């Protein structure tokens, strides 16, 4: 039972971090599925085991470098976020479903949907806060916020693999934060609309 809860924590942590940066958790999972060579740290369910292939690691690495670079440039980061509106939730869905123990205990469609919703929710929160950062700093704070998001995605991904229960709790906290931010945003929008 404890292992099942830990696996859910791993899935929640990886999917949530994909909402911040799709390629950081994908690369960490790919490397964990590949190394150490004699007994990989992570076993992925089929067909997701392809993430551990050398060519997948190479492609994800290149995409990560591109994403981390363009996300630091004002105006270009907005375009990047629009493009990743599809990529981040899809990455979250794959990461949630790829865990070998999760996929056997939860229907694959449910696992994919859960990952999609988690990553999509985190991405939506990121998408609503980034324009505020751009407006308040004139774009000069975007690189710093992007760097913080990358660091958060990295550590949440590592926690998801090494301390899954903690990662699951952090992911739930992140989900609550997203909901509260969304409510605050909607309340602010209602106050701005003249009646």
Image (cartoon, grey):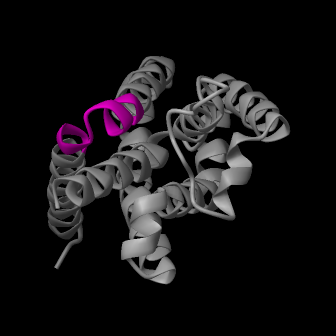
Q: Is residue 40 left or right of residue 158?
A: right
**Can residue 182 be seen by looking at this rendering?**
yes
Q: Is residue 180 left or right of residue 101?
A: left
Residue 102, given in percent of the width and then of the height, sits at 40, 65
| Closest to the observer, 86 or 181 | 86
Q: Quadrant of residue 164?
A: top left
Magenta-drawn stretch, dominant element (helix, strand or loop) = helix
| Closest to the observer, 129 or 55 | 55
**Can residue 120 be seen by looking at this rendering?**
no
| Closest to the observer, 148 or 104 | 104
Residue 33 vs 190, above or below: the answer is above
Q: Quadrant of residue 178?
A: bottom left
Residue 177, given in percent of the width and then of the height, sits at 17, 50
Question: What stretch of residues is rendered in magenta?
Answer: 157-167
Q: Per the image, is 188 magenta?
A: no
Q: Residue at x 85, y 37 (%)?
A: 55
Residue 125 vs 28, above or below: the answer is below
Q: Residue at x 38, y 36 (%)?
A: 161
**Quadrant of the drawing holding the N terminus:** bottom left
Q: Residue at x 64, y 27 (%)?
A: 38
| In the image, farthest residue toward the right | 55
| Closest to the observer, 194 or 111 | 111
Residue 151, given in percent of the width and then of the height, sits at 41, 22
Q: Per the image, is 161 magenta?
A: yes
């Amino acid at each position: 039972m404890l292992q099942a809860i830990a696996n859910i924590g791993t899935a929640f942590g990886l999917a949530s971090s994909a909402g911040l940066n799709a390629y950081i958790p994908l690369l960490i999972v790919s490397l964990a599925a590949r190394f150490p060579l004699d007994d990989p740290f992570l076993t992925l369910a089929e067909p997701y085991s392809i993430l551990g292939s050398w060519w997948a690691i190479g492609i994800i690495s290149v995409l990560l470098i591109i994403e981390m670079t363009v996300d630091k440039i004002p105006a270009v980061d907005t375009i990047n976020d629009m493009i990743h509106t599809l990529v981040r939730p899809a990455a979250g869905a794959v990461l949630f479903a790829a865990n070998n123990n999760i996929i056997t205990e939860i229907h694959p469609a449910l696992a994919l949907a859960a990952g999609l919703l988690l990553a999509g929710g985190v991405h939506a929160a990121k998408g609503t806060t980034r324009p505020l950062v751009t407006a308040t700093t004139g774009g000069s704070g975007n690189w710093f916020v992007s760097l913080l998001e990358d660091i958060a995605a990295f550590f949440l991904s590592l926690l998801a693999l090494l301390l899954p229960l903690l990662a699951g709790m952090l992911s739930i906290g992140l989900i609550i934060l997203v909901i509260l931010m969304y409510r605050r945003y909607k309340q602010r929008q209602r106050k701005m609309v003249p009646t």
